[in-house]
Image (cartoon, coloured by chain):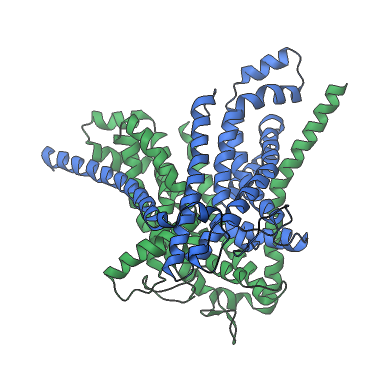
Amino acid sequence: MFSRSIDHAVHLILVLCVVITILTTVIVVVLLGKESYLFFQQVPLWDFLFGTRWEPLLEPKSFGVLPLVVGTLKIVFGSIVIALPLGLLIATYLSEFASTRFRSIIKPVLEVLAGIPTVVYGYFALTFVTPIIRTLFPDTQIFNAASAAIVVGIMILPMISSLCDDAFQSLPNTLREGAYALGATKFEVAVQVILPSAAARVGAAVILALSRAIGETMAVTLAAGATPQMSIGFLESIQTMTAYIVQVSLGDIPAGGIEYQTCYAVGLLLFLMTLVMNIIGNHFITQSRKIHL
Amino acid sequence: MNRKQRKLKEQLFIWTCRVATWMAVAILFTLLFHVVREGIEWLDLDFLDSFPSRKPEQAGIKSALWGSVWLIGLTAMISIPLSLGSALYLEEYAPQNRWTRIIEINLANLAGMPSILYGLLGLAVFVRYFGLESSLWSGSLTLSLLVLPVVVIASKGAIRSVPLSIREGAYALGARRWQVVLYQVLPSALPGIMTGIILALSRAMGETAPLIMVGALSYIAFLPESPSDPFTVLPVQIYNWAARPQDDFHGLAAGGIIVLLVLLLTLNAGAVFIRSKLQRYKS
């Protein structure tokens, strides 16, 4: 009898734990939604999404989020240009060419790279990468998008290489053996057989990495500056969505003011962008797992 | 293309891949080398045992170090039971239906949500709504939510890898479900779960943005005595120093980074040790 009631009690406690995970999402959605709703009562949605001037802290105030989005996209674009080719090459090497021994040494090294806190990458960008860029291009500003994009690229590199490595490893060996039997070289097998077969999961890896780059905060806050502007160059100061949220919270913001609400409006945009990308990425990964198992 | 050219291309490609791999290793060592070179001269016992100061030569990380220890301790105490409970429920109790699928998708998304959004949540819910102010409570509750999905996903893997025969054996001897879970499944899955917990906590230890959001002050010249005290942590202190223009403060930041990385590497080494020595069933 006693045992059975414990069984029910344990069941109930465990259900409560799971409820918290769901509650987190619900609270995030409700919170971002509520504060953004208050924000959009004062600033039209159209002006927010398509305005080209972001000056919420200075008079005359202007709430066009595009400069922040452009800044974020610069980081995302720059980082993926660095991380994708390198990550694919590393994954190909680890999965197709390297010995098991070498693999077992390199994988933990990459894990260390992934485990380094983002604030450390920010420091590295500011004190190591930026001086190098400034020697190469003397008119580069101290805070610039290039330096931040490079370290964010380094940051997402282990994610891309390990997800792609998993993708290549999950392909059946018969694919490779068939191609080799037809006389293909290792290059041809890797590029014409393995890569296309794993395309869906490589795509998923890229999407998940992009989502990580969008949400990256400390490296861009430290290295990319705090100047929201619509521009094309990588050598000037920018501001990303995440860096804006940090900037506002570093000052003392009164709850309920419009500055406080801008954080949540920008946060909502950030949430939606990363959510969509994460859902698509994770969906591709689970789908392709089902096919190959 | 003749055979010779194709072979040449093959060799070229393999070398490109090899160089790319070594480049990643080189980047890691460049980063570590740079930090150590910049920070080593600031690193001494005084640095560990002084409060932050406006004068670089007197500044130290005492409050940040102890703040980090407090914060990670509290985060562990809050997040471990919750995530263990969730993982056990999802693997051992939950029926496989649409709800559990939604919960799992939700977990994957939470694990990928930018950490700064957890900061916004912590600021609105813990700091403002529950009135916890910028205390260790706010920080650790926020970080607990952040690590929760990571630990749950890792623990689920570890629990799933426990062979069914272990459970069936226990049931055959007349054990109840909670007895099977508590006395058989949990101990067998423990090494895997602990690895997940340690890795998640080391992520929490390096988090900066959400703690800035909940107001981990950067200039604190006292040690926290209870969870309701204000605090600062290593990454926030590092950020604060790195954001200043003076070179001396950059050196202090590098010193702080060395301490932080040593702590993180120790934690990670512990995780690797547990994984290799204690794990009975590979997931």
**Residue at the spot 34% in from the left edge and 73% down from the top edge:** A140
Residue A114 shows up from this direction? yes
B84 or B67, which is in the foreground?
B67
**Residue at the spot 19% in from the left edge and 44% down from the top edge:** B12
A147 or A27, which is in the foreground?
A147
Residue B157 shows up from this direction? no
Which residue lies most toward the right here?
Answer: A1
Left or right position of B26 against A279: left
Which residue lies most toward the top here?
Answer: B173
Q: Quadrant of residue A186?
A: top left
Chain B shade? blue
Q: Quadrant of the N terminus of chain A?
A: top right
Residue A273 horizontal/vertical position (percent): 55, 60
Q: Compared with residue B259, is residue A9 higher up or lower down, i.e. above or below?
A: above
Q: Quadrant of residue A249?
A: bottom right
Residue B260 horizontal/vertical position (percent): 50, 50
Left or right position of A66 against A149: right
Residue A54 horizontal/vertical position (percent): 54, 78
**Residue at the spot 68% in from the left edge and 62% down from the top edge:** B123
**Residue at the spot 55% in from the left edge and 66% down from the top edge:** B53
The chain in green:
A
